[in-house]
Image (tube, grey):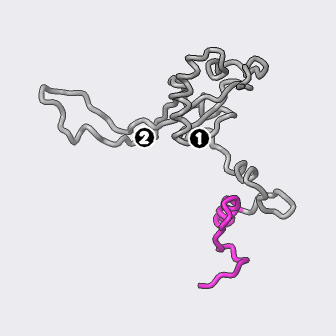
Amino acid sequence: MHTNSSSPNTTVKMPHLLSVARRLEQGIPPISGPADGWVASRRVAARLAARVLIRPQPGFYVMRLRSGGPLVSAIIYQLCPMVIPQPMTVTGPHPEEWCRPLDRSRRFEAGLDGKRVEVDRVWTARSLRRVSGAEFAFRSGPLRRWARENPSAPEARPYRPIDLGAIPPLF
């Protein structure tokens, strides 16, 4: 079947227009925005795909513990949805009973700078930003060890704002 370029079924090749195309496919009228009526930039498209605060997404993140503070690593992960029964006899339970899927909603936990915290503490932070696994590993490994060896570094005091005048010059 041949479709012309003005058809609503035309595939969108520009990623920043993907959310608008999905809305049109679902029968939702376009959002009023710029004069031409279409999403003009990635920033506007990102605003359209805002986080749903009651649905945390597992992943690697960075965030600030306070305004003006350094970025710290954060992680949200899903707990294993399996039940491990307690041994009932000397021989133990049957192996098929070790992994049974639960019939309830998913459970998440979060870690912030290597410490376990509530999921809402991480997911609802305004400064939360998704990062790659490699950046998360760097921030939680080598960067944290370096901060322990250099107590005057901003990364060693994430609860304080960064004072650029107190940082020694690089050269």
Give how far across and how far down residue 114 sits, in percent. Answer: 51, 25
Tell us which disc is closer to us: 2 or 1.
1
Q: Amino acid at mark 1?
A: Val
Image quarter (top left, top right, bottom left or bottom right) of the C terminus = top right
Q: Which residue is label 1 attached to?
A: 131
Q: Point out the stretch of residues depicted in magenta.
A: 1-28
Identify whether 29 is placed above or below 43: below
Nearer to me, 159 or 169: 169
Choose top left, top right, bottom left or bottom right for residue 2.
Answer: bottom right
Q: Amino acid at mark 2?
A: Arg
Identify whether 170 is placed above or below 47: above
Queried whether the magenta region covers residue 52, the answer comes back as no
Visible in this render: residue 137? yes
Determine the CA span between mark 2 and mark 1.
Answer: 29 Å
Visible in this render: residue 58? no
Residue 104's disc is 2
